[in-house]
Each structure stands twice: as C-alpha cells, then as structure tokens.
Amino acid sequence: MTGLLDDLAAVLGDNLLLGDDDRRLRSRDYSVRSELDEWRGKITMPAAVATPTTVDAVAAVVRVCLAHRAPIVTRGAGSGVVGGVLPSPDSVVISTERLAGMRDLEPADLLASFGAGTLGIDAENRVQAHGFTIGHWPQSIDRSTVGGWVATRASGQYSTAYGNIEDMVYGLEAVLPDGSIYRSRSTPRAAAGPDLRHLLIGSEGTLGIVTEVTFSLRPLPEPGIRQAFHFADIEAGVNAIRSVVVPGWRPPVVRLYDARESRRHFGEHVPRGRCMAIFLHEGPPGHAQLEAAAVADLCRTAEGESADSEAVDHWFEQRNIVPSWTELFEQGLVVDTIEVATGWSKLADLYHAVTTAVSAVPGVIAATGHSSHAYRSGANLYFSFAAQPPDPDDFAATHAACWNAAMEATVAAGAGIAHHHGVGRIRQPWMADELGPGGSALLAAVKKALDPDDLFNPGAVIPDPVA
Ligand SMILES: Cc1cc2nc3c(=O)[nH]c(=O)nc-3n(C[C@H](O)[C@H](O)[C@H](O)COP(=O)(O)OP(=O)(O)OC[C@H]3O[C@@H](n4cnc5c(N)ncnc54)[C@H](O)[C@@H]3O)c2cc1C
C-alpha cells in the first residue's frame, strides 16, 4: 500500500487526498444501499482519493494504479442511485471534481465542451448565458456532473423532445484502462465503423474515465405552454400519451402518473382515483401553440378531462426537491425508486405486474409509478416504493427484496431493466437477463480486452461469467 501511495503522491502532489474525512465523503453515492451503510456506521473507505486536474494527470494516476493492481472507482458528484461508487479498501477513487469548467464554446456550430467534473447546473448556466441550452435537465442537475451523465446514460426531464444524453453528446475524451487517451472525431455524424463513444456512454467507470464532454446545443426556447389532463385509469392514460407521441408530437415534458402519485403530486388539482398527465410545449415560434392544440384534441379524444395548468406550474416548482433517505430511515421508512422501460403494448401490464410484485413484499406500504419519458415505440415506468419494516436491522433485506421483486417482474415481462439510472452494483445481478447469453459474452469480451485485470469499477455493470 505504501508503494502505491508514494507513487500516487509523486504524480498528484496536493491533489492526492488521504485524510479520513476526504475519503469518507467520496466513498459512496446516493443509493439507498450507500446511505444505509453510512447510517449504520458501516462505510468502507478507499485507500486514497485522487483529484487530478488534467487528462494527462488522470492517465498518470491510471498507470500507477495498473502497476500496483489497485482497483479504480471513478466518481463524479456521487448522485448515482444504484451503487456505482462503492469503493473497496484497496481501491483508489479518481474524483473528477477538479476537471471542471467550460473548455470551449463554438456558437456557429452550437458546440460546448466541459471538463467531466463540471456540475450539470454550471454547464447549463454557462451555455444559457450565450442563448443556448444543453436540453438535459435531470432532477439531479445541481448535484451531478456532465461526466456522470455520460457514464450512466442519463435522461433529463425534457427527453421526449430533446432526447437522452446519448443524443446530446457530440464528442468525448477519455482515459482508457491501459492509461491511453481516446478522443472521438468531431463531426455531426459518421458512417465510419461502430460509434466508439458508445463504449463509454453507460459504461459507469468500467471501461474508462470520461475526462471531457462536448455537447451539441440548442437555441434557448421561449417560455412554453403547460397543460394537464386526467384519465380514468393507467390504461386510458397510456393510450393518451401513445396517441400523442406516435403521430410525431414531441412535447419536451410528457408525464403520466398513477392515481396515488397523482394525488401525492397534484392534490386537489386531480379528482381522487384519476391519473394525471402533464405536458410542456416549446420550440421555434408558433410550434408550442400548434402542438398544445393538437395534444389537447388527442387527450380529449382519449377521454381525458382538462385539469388546471397550475398543476403543471406546481410540478415545475417542486421538480428538483430531493428527499433525504436518512430522514426517512429515522421515521422507520425505507423508500426507493426503480425505472424500467417497455413497448406501448406491454406498458400498462408491466405497471400492474411490478406494483403488485413489490406490494407483496412484507412491510411494503406503497408501490406506485409514473411514466416520464415517451418514445415512438414505448415509454419508461418509474416506480417508487415505501416499506416500514418492524426493525431497522431489516431495512437492507426489505430494500433488497423490493428490488428483487421489481426486477424479476420486469425480466418476466420481457421489459428493459434500466431506463436511466444505470446498473451500478444494485442491478448488476440482472444484467445477464438483460443482455442474454450472446450480449453478456460480448460485453465480457470487451471488458477483458480493455481491462484484463478487472480494475475499473469491479463488481459494477458487467454480468458475472456464466458458470
Ligand atoms: C435526487 C436525484 C434525482 C435524480 N434524477 C435523475 C434524473 O432525472 N435522470 C437521471 O438520468 N438520473 C437521475 N439521478 C441519478 C444521477 O444523478 C445520475 O445517474 C447522474 O448521471 C450521476 O452523475 P454523478 O456525477 O453524480 O455520478 P456518480 O454518482 O459520481 O457516478 C455514477 C457512475 O458513473 C461513474 N462515473 C462518474 N463520472 C464518471 C466519469 N467521468 N467517467 C467514467 N465514469 C464515471 C461512476 O463510477 C459511477 O459508476 C438522480 C439522482 C438523485 C439523487
């Protein structure tokens, strides 16, 4: 260990952090599993935290870790919710926090580059000052990094119009597991073999460290039009949002809530037992009015009833408020969220299958869901559950049982196990189901070729070898 720390100190100087507080702060993400560990005083700290300031320094740290066979866990801002940042005691956390700030802006080409550790809200504010938007607005925008967005294949709240992170990333720079540096070509599209950026997008620190992200920007739109409708049940609501998206309307925000969540989020704005759908329309001049009118017609045809648009205003005001898991533990509650995806024809059935399966876990007092990202061929479902186990010693087991129930129901329905939070360590046991034998072997082969000693975020994402 001393040799590792000495060699890291030689390349990092003051950017090597060894103090207990520094290591503890960077030894977890925002997953319930991490927070439970910390609440119960069971946190595992890495051997060291590296905070390099340049891509060359990242590469130098990787080479030192390779020489000492020290596992590497990359960390952005630690807002991940699936246990992507859970370092072992012999590992080195490479934190991107000092790889921050705007590197370049090309207004004519609508491009902006940022160090991977730039906080999302800082990147968005920088481009908004020039009349642009990235168009990516995750609920965690003020606590996640642009590199983390790429690493987890994130989605923002405006995805139905603007796409997910993979649609916004124009270019990437990364340090690969052998310490070499990869830079993607800078071109709006290429038919030049497989798109290598996609080896890194969603790789969650297992195939490299993203050090810089270039976004393709959009002009900042005028304030949009907001409207809401409520429906008899989840089937009617799904039918309505399908009828909006399939012909080609793309409101940036399309969200449909089940009856319990509708009351929780919109209170008296929605009659008890009805399912609320909310929309935001924006775009070039004239587009929002046209789209809002068409969507209103489609929702009424699908037997929706108009709700007060103040309901949507309320959602906008509340949308970035974040719960504290620990406060909920103190109240005896274990709460978490799980997002999955499937085609239109299976969406309502999947909703019922997952909420029923999770509700059957002993101690569960609520299992609810909404859809927040819609596509031509289907949508996501975002489930929330709350459980009240009789004893805090049972929190971890109850939490695991809820995840197990949700994932098994999702796999049984032939749906996708992860829409936008990624895999981390919490979903890793279901990756073999997600990818199938051929896909699992392909990903394992890529991993072996790039990282033969399995030093990059071991235990995350990559399915276990078939026995
Ligand atoms: C309240 C709340 C709301 C959220 N809302 C959303 C949402 O709307 N949409 C959404 O998609 N997600 C959401 N998330 C999840 C989380 O914010 C995203 O997964 C985010 O992209 C993680 O970014 P981060 O910088 O915090 O990454 P971290 O949590 O630090 O890391 C996440 C994973 O990525 C890896 N990683 C991080 N940076 C890099 C890098 N530069 N190179 C390689 N690997 C890296 C880590 O090793 C880890 O495996 C939410 C989380 C919270 C707590």
Image (cartoon, rainbow, N blue to C red):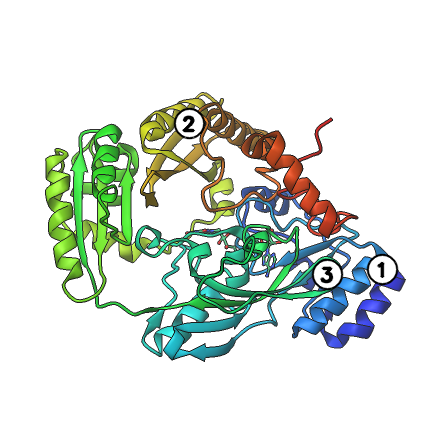
Q: How far apart are marks 3 and 1 (CA)?
A: 25 Å
60 vs 448: above or below: below
Q: In this view, does 309 lie to the left or right of 342?
A: left
Contact, CB < 8 Å: mark 3 with mark 1? no
Q: Which mark's residue is nearer the viewer, 2 or 3?
A: 2
Q: Residue drawn 59% across and 52% down?
A: 199
Q: Residue drawn 32% across and 33% down?
A: 344
The residue pinned by badge 3 equals: 20
Give SS at disc 2.
helix
The residue pinned by badge 1 equals: 67
Q: Residue furthest front?
A: 192
Ligand 1 lies under 8 Å from the Cβ of mark 2: no
Q: Residue 354 carries which label?
A: 2
Which x, y percent locates residue 434?
54, 33
Q: Distance between the residues labelled 2 and 3?
A: 41 Å
Which x, y percent locates residue 119?
49, 66
In this view, the residue in front, 396 or 306, is: 306
Dot 1 crowding, Cα within 10 Å, few <14, some 14–19, many 20+:
few
Q: Residue furthest right?
A: 3
Residue 42 in view of the camera: no
Q: Which amino acid does label 2 sit on?
A: Val
Q: How far apart are marks 1 and 2 (CA)?
A: 46 Å
Quarter of the figure with residue 370 = top left
Contact, CB < 8 Å: mark 2 with mark 3? no
